[in-house]
């Protein structure tokens, strides 16, 4: 792609959108979709950033793709979930290619570890080194590697998503490489046929490139070195953009990094002492971090952590010297050496970031005691985003729920961005009700749980089951589920019972079943119809006060922290949870919030305004009557 691409002749964007939507099986004119398409068209034409909230049912994907394509701009679409990325690649873009009447090329670009590596397959086929590697593997892993090798000869993309079966992690790791390990096509004998490089070449020539937001974050961290040049970037599911950027532009060091690095070095360096020293760093780091999980660390780091990091850096520097000293004329061996050097070098870079203690960054320990991670993240992603994105290209940020502080948190200058809400086509006022149990005690009161369970029992009874109950902790979920199983005849499923897909299916297949879950299901659950008629949320989902990164950001902001961080995040999460209820024009139901602060606190309207425009009540009798009516 090129900034000098010739623009397309003038095309009526709304007429093009109507042409496309008319080809849908259930064609309808949506005012919000038209409004959003016009806003996107204007933003691209005027080179102004746009933040647009588009409620469920708007059809936002077509509302941004059509004007982006008719503008003739080169575009990257970044999505936060694999499901949306796959939808764009397998459904939306092919559909537009057929019906929009514009010639355009599109591509999907993923991280290197998503593609089978031809060089790794070549090494596995080597009767010397490959045989040694395979001997260490289980029979099923060896069989899967053979199957993957056969597939690699026929696949056009080498993308694991193309498989109609799921290889084990061990098998896929054996035939793929990550970005921290690959030395690049120029130094690889398989570079010309490399699937990952092929995807990058295709992306470079495409008008539209679909990527994961995490990959875009890596692109930003690498000073725009990963993705092809583009004029417009569209961030779908933009409500998680700040968190993803924090994850990708900092550093992360975990025990698993040293285990993987030791295995990579072992493939080229026959020195048990060196590989054992590298592998031993994992246990040393685990011991140093495990007592600090959930903690924010000072700068400089405490000696109990700084010393193991410094030791790790010295160990890797020594290992790197041994790798440099290896001389071989065997091409496969050269590649194993290069991968080991690349992975060692990038691990040293991560250690340096942690050891040096960058200004404007905070260090903390996440994960669990068994698997802790040291993370170094920016307090403010705004400056990085401003330099790498906002000053480089036009950005469209959209989601069904947009935090009120999004633009400010991401560093978008107020005079360069327009912010809009195009609403939703659903008739929330007639079809839904928001109930706040204002008579309940504060959620921190010892009496809250028992009284909330009484409320929950009455609501589930009125709905005849059909309930998705969402909790802000596993403990609250487990207590409520145990209480309801003792009081109701309905089947009560919890998030602990089945994998997510099977869990949602079991819930959707039986009207009388109730599903109790935690924050993991506040989004991503799509159960239209009467099967889901009641969403219960136990309390306003404020972020944890002891979250180490957020606590550091609160300290940085001072008195405005609650309004800039906590309220917008709680509002977004509550809106996401409420959004599970109405998924089609015919859906009806109730969102019940057990937290009385939604009706009493001085910040209540900041949260209520973020929710769909449902009819509101504080009287349970009205809710019970409404539920009985819609579920009859």
Image (cartoon, grey):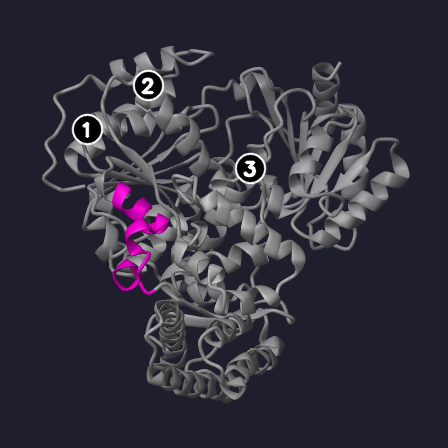
Magenta span contains residue 135: no
Q: Position of residue 322 (x, y in %)?
A: 39, 86
Q: Nearer the viewer, residue 192 or 68?
A: 192
- Residue 164 is marked as 3
Quarter-of-image position of residue 183? bottom left
Q: Nearer the viewer, residue 256 or 343?
A: 343
Q: Which-is-in-front pick, marks 3 and 1?
A: 3
Q: Residue at x 70, y 27 (%)?
A: 508
Q: Earlier in the sequence, mark 2 or mark 3?
A: 2
Q: Main secondary structure of the magenta part?
A: helix
Drawn side of residue 489 relative to residue 211, left or right:
right
- Residue 98 is marked as 2
Residue 464 in sight in this render: yes
The boundaries of the magenta stretch are 183-202
- Residue 71 is marked as 1
Q: Residue at x 27, y 42 (%)?
A: 203
Q: Are marks 2 and 3 in contact (CB under 8 Å)?
A: no
Q: Secondary structure at mark 3?
A: loop
Question: Dot 1, how many residues are within 10 Å of its Cα: few (below 14), some (14-19), or many (20+)?
Answer: many
* Label 2 – label 3 distance at C-alpha: 25 Å
Quadrant assignment for the C terminus: top right
Q: Earlier in the sequence, mark 3 or mark 1?
A: 1
């Amino acid at each position: 792609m090129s900034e000098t691409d010739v623009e397309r002749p003038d095309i009526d964007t709304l007429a093009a959108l109507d042409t496309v939507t008319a080809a849908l099986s259930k064609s309808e004119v949506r005012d919000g979709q038209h409004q959003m398409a016009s806003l996107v068209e204007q933003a691209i034409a005027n080179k102004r950033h746009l933040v647009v909230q588009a409620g469920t049912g708007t059809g936002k994907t077509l509302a941004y793709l059509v004007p982006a394509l008719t503008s003739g701009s080169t575009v990257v679409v970044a999505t936060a979930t694999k499901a949306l990325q796959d939808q764009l690649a397998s459904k939306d873009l092919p559909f537009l290619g057929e019906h929009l009447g514009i010639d355009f090329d599109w591509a999907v670009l993923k991280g290197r570890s998503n593609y089978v590596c031809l060089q790794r397959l070549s090494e596995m086929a080597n009767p010397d080194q490959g045989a040694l590697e395979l001997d260490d593997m289980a029979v099923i892993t060896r069989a899967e590697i053979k199957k993957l090798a056969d597939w690699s000869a026929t696949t056009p993309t080498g993308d694991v998503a193309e498989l109609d079966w799921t290889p084990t992690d061990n098998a896929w790791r054996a035939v793929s490489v990550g970005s921290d390990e690959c030395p690049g096509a120029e130094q690889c004998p398989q570079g010309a046929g490399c699937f990952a490089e092929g995807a990058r070449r295709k992306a470079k020539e495409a008008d539209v490139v679909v990527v994961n937001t995490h990959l875009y974050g890596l692109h930003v961290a690498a000073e725009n070195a990963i993705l092809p040049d583009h004029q417009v970037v569209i961030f779908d599911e933009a409500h998680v953009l700040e968190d993803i950027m924090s994850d990708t532009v900092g550093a992360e060091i975990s025990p698993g990094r040293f285990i993987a690095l030791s295995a990579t070095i072992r493939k080229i360096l026959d020195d048990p002492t060196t590989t054992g020293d590298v592998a031993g760093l994992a246990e040393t780091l685990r011991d140093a971090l495990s007592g600090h999980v959930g903690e924010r660390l000072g700068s400089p780091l405490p000696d109990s952590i700084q010393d193991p990091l410094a030791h790790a850096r010295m160990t890797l520097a020594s290992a790197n010297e041994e790798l440099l000293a290896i001389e071989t004329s065997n091409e496969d061996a050269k590649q194993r050496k290069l991968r080991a050097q690349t992975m060692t070098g990038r691990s040293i870079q991560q250690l340096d970031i942690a050891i040096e203690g960058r200004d404007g960054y905070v260090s903390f320990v996440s994960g669990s005691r068994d698997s802790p991670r040291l993370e170094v993240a920016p307090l403010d992603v705004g400056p990085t985003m401003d330099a790498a994105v906002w000053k480089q290209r036009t950005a469209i940020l959209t989601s069904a729920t947009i935090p009120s502080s999004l633009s400010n948190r991401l560093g978008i200058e107020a005079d360069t961005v327009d912010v809009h809400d195009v609403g939703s086509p659903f008739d929330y006022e007639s079809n839904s009700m928001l109930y706040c149990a204002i008579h309940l005690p504060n959620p921190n009161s010892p009496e809250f749980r028992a009284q909330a369970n009484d409320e929950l029992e009455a609501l589930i009874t009125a709905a005849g089951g059909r309930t998705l109950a969402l909790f802000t902790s596993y403990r609250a979920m487990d207590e409520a589920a145990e209480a309801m199983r003792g009081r109701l005849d309905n089947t009560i499923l919890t998030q602990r019972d089945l994998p997510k897909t099977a869990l949602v299916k079991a819930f959707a297949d039986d009207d009388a079943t109730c599903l109790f879950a935690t924050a993991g299901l506040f989004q991503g659950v799509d159960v239209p119809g009467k099967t889901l008629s009641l969403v219960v949320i136990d309390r306003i989902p404020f972020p944890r006060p002891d979250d180490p990164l957020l606590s550091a950001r609160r300290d940085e902001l001072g008195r405005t922290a609650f309004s800039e961080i906590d309220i917008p995040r709680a509002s977004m999460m509550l809106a996401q949870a409420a959004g599970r209820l109405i998924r089609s024009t015919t859906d009806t139901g109730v969102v019940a919030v057990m937290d009385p602060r939604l009706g009493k606190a001085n910040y209540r309207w900041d949260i209520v305004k973020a929710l769909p425009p449902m009819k509101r009540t504080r009287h349970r009798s009205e809710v019970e009557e409404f539920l009985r009516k819609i579920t009859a």
